[in-house]
Image (cartoon, grey):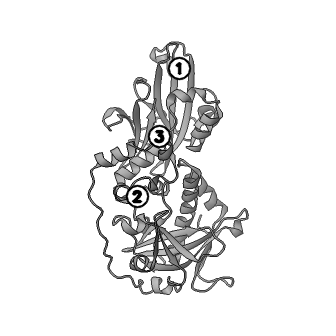
Amino acid sequence: MIPNFFNRLPKIAPDELYCTFSWEMQTEAWQQSRRHSHPSARDRAYVGHLCLNGFIGWLAERFDSDRKSIKPYLKNLEGLWEFIDGIPILWGNTRLLLIPHQTIELTELVVPQEWVDIPELVADYYLAVQVNLDNEEEDCWMRVCGFASHGEMKQKGEYRRSDRSYLLSSEAWHQDLTLLWETGGISPPKNIANLPPMSYTTVKAALSELSPKAFRSSRLRLQLPFPQWGRLMANETWREELYQQRMQPPPLTQWFEIQASAVVSELKAMGWQLYGEVFGGSQFAGAFRRRGIGEPKAEVSCVKRIEIEDEAIALIINLMQDAEGSIAILPQLRPFNASDRTACLSAGIGVALLDATGQILTQVESEPKTNLLQFTQPFSNSPGMQFQIRISKGNSSQTVWFSI
């Protein structure tokens, strides 16, 4: 649902863009923001989705444009919001970057260094956005207070080493947005130095040296020298892999302790739920036993909602531990629709099992009227080993990392 947008309101200056966020927008943004590893990233994603949808809706209405023609200029925004603030939007041939600030009075624009010094991420214009999120719907809004070009951020902005960001005072940015809307702005050509080349092996080695605590930290972007971190963020594949590794749930051996508060808290924070909480009943009636696996010592099934090309899919991980401690693993896909147990997956949805190096070990694909998609047999591996489950549809895919 698109909210009402106003180019001018009595309580704000006429050169500011203002829009409100409806309850529907807030609910949708909250659901989309759950796919992150820690609270600060979830907050970034929540505000990011609100501002993205609100701003695109305003542009489409203001300039009578097709909403679908205004879109982010980078893919996999969740992988960016896991680490940094910023909403990248492509409007025609112009790159706009919204930087949201939740503050009573917006006096400076704070832009993470990644958006200024990484050629693949830079914008033409940086927009200072004030955001207010209140319990009342009418008090949830955003407004654009001004903008600056990339050159102005570099020349007039103050670089702050403590958090790798550029700061620009409100006195230095343009408050008259008509310069941006009507004339295309005043941005000169950008002169950005390329980051030094670096092999993926070097980046992986640097990341592997980080402690688990540092890897989980919300300040991971500050743990590596910027040239290394910048190259990692510049590459879409590497960035997505890092995001998925951050989203890796606790080792599967700990899932049997699902009643332990620490384990369940971490799983739920990453979007996992017990099978019974989503679909009701038990998942184990025949899931393993039809495959010749004996009486289990322990068993558990967890579900995570995966959205791919506007289709909601339930990724189900079934685990069974025998008397000797060996673990059998059976991933499944089904529609994420608890109210209709007969719903089917779209044809052509694939699920693949990959090792830690990305080699495909086995894969299957849904056919018309497929209600449940799974591998022919469960698999197992040694404790500490990693594997990946990749879900694909058309040209889109999502990968979830696991360790045993």
Image coords of residue 72 (percent x, y): 43, 64
Question: Relative to the observer, which residue lies in front, 307 or 191?
Answer: 191
Q: Earlier in the sequence, mark 2 or mark 1?
A: 2
What residue is shown with label 3?
345
In this picture, residue 134 sits left or right of residue 2: right
2 shown above or below 40 = below
Q: Residue at x 53, y 47 (%)?
A: 37
What residue is shown with label 2?
75
Q: CA distance from mark 2 to mark 3?
A: 25 Å
299 shown above or below 276 = above
Mark 2: few/some/many CA within 10 Å (<14, 14-19, 20+): few
Q: Earlier in the sequence, mark 2 or mark 3?
A: 2
Q: Residue at x 46, y 64 (%)?
A: 164
What residue is shown with label 1?
286
Q: Nearer the viewer, mark 2 or mark 3?
A: 2
Q: CA distance from mark 1 to mark 3?
A: 21 Å
In this picture, residue 189 sits left or right of residue 101: left
Can residue 9 be seen here? The reply is yes
